[in-house]
Amino acid sequence: MNAPQAADPQAADPQAADPRAVDPQPVTPQLVAHLAATLDEAALAHRTVARLTDTTDLDLAAAYRVQRAVIDRRLARGEALIGVKMGFTSRAKMMQMGVDDVIWGLLTDAMLVEEGGVLDPAELIHPRIEPEIAFLIGSPLSGTVTPAEAVRAIAGVAVAYEVLDSRYADFDFTLPDVIADNASAAGFGFGTWHDPAGLDLSNLGLLVEIDGRVVTSGSSAAILGNPLRSLIAAARLAAEAGLELRPGWVVLAGAATAAMPLPGGVHVRVSAAGLGRAEVTTR
Amino acid sequence: MTVTETETAMNAIDAAAARLLDAERSGVPCAPIRDLITGVEDAYAVQERLTLGRLAEGRRLVGRKIGLTSAAVQRQLGVREPDFGMLYADMAVPDGAEVPVGAVLQPRAEAEVALVLEADLTHERHTVADLIRATAFALPAIEVCGSRVRDWDITLADTVADNASSGMYVLGTRPVALGGLDLRLAGMVLERRGEPVSTGTGAACLGHPLNAALWLADTLVRLGRPLRAGDTVLTGALGPMVAVAPGDVLEARIDGLGDVRVAFAATNSEEETS
């Protein structure tokens, strides 16, 4: 963005002179690249940045372009796209954000924590963890799909956790901000894959334990009433983004509880009824 | 305690009981009673005063409800223990039946695991084994809580005195043996028009619904009215309590236990406008 020169007050639009005023300029490819760099560098440096919408008028489409540009920077560093994460899958969260649709973020292999592995919170800003249900894609899925088609495309289902880390202070963001920030994605892990045949995923109890103590619990029903609906939404968003959910990809369907702060030096275990557990230790 | 002090305390307990009873009978919520009494023991004395009155009216005691079983609610009220209230036969509603308008003051709903006993629990301290052996079966339940205290402005003393903010309750109809259940990881969803309005797990109830029932069994022996064969125990909410409105129909599903419904009568004025 071209900041007006303070030395030439005549040239400055009084609105633009206020650094917090919304910039009316169109979201050019250059601006998208600049915003993506801001977020990506913040993540690399483990520090927060001002909300993009404080200075730029971002609509949802532009926000998704920034998200894609953030991911492209990661892919350019050698990371690979291995899945998607769904956000705002609880009615409470949707109402809180004033939205009526889910959002998504993209997952790369660098975000995957190996099962039972170690995560260093020092490489993150203010990490939180939440219990999720994950799907392993077995056959390509994209566009408007029926529940039957979605179920057929699933190679496995597992209990999972997602580590969130907003690049904005205090997780304080508007909808376009959080979309641009790849839906706060930072890390994820999952347990053993299970055959979905015969499993009713609509009301599984999930628990998060830190050092053996339950810190939160909930039901998979909090994920759009049934995590399968989240997978169907992922297929729809994939088509809108010109992508498809590919075999081997992981879809994090959404959280069963509110996210909990993730401190250093602890052991976290996420359990789901019938799906076992996923564990991670923090340094 | 001198005679006068005892009299003052007794009068305070009578006054608190009278205020709650008046709210129940008039259908007009009252001011909190916490200023009238001191401490939770007094609050249970108020509850006992109301219980004796209800039993004298011929109401049949059929069990207990356990309240304040979630960490969040305990934090909110600044307490570290659950509480309990009495369940009478006339508080039970059949699965799917309608709760009349005004039957419960300021109604709110929550889904719970109900245990039905087939043996007395009269030991000073019970083990989980005692409890499992005494449990005939479990059922899914919806508790329709209510508060006689205006705007649910309650402390521990207020809710204990007010029969643990009980109202009515609905039990599911397919008994399930404990042996086949993982109650700790059992998912719970309470739905209104197909939308989840409350979700949770068995672990949200003191870590496990049986933990809550154990606390109740021991506490009731200490207070002299132990759990008996045939009693129903509502063990406590598995997720947040939700406010209900006239016309609502709620369905609760607890994984492994099945489902149960409750309906709330629409008011006449609403029927006319809808």
Image (spheres, helix red, strand yellow):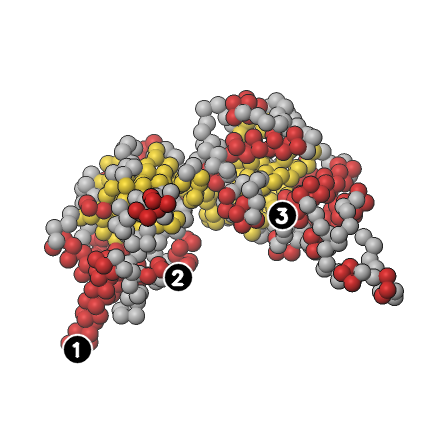
Q: Residue at x 53, y 35 (%)?
A: A133
Circle 2 crowding by C-alpha within 10 Å: few under 14, some 14–19, many from 20: few
The residue that disc 3 covers is: A175
Residue B65 seen in the figure: no
Circle 1 crowding by C-alpha within 10 Å: few under 14, some 14–19, many from 20: few
Q: Quadrant of residue B30?
A: bottom left
Checking the image for residue B4, the label placed there is 1
Disc 3 to disc 1, how far (Cα)? 65 Å
Which label sits in the foreground, 3 or 1?
A: 3
Q: Amino acid at mark 1?
A: Thr
Q: Residue at x 32, y 54 (%)?
A: B106
- In the picture shown, does residue A262 fall above or below A270? below
Which label sits in the foreground, 2 or 3?
A: 3
Residue A31 horizontal/vertical position (percent):
79, 47
Chain of the residue where label 3 is placed in the rendered structure:
A
Residue B15 seen in the figure: yes
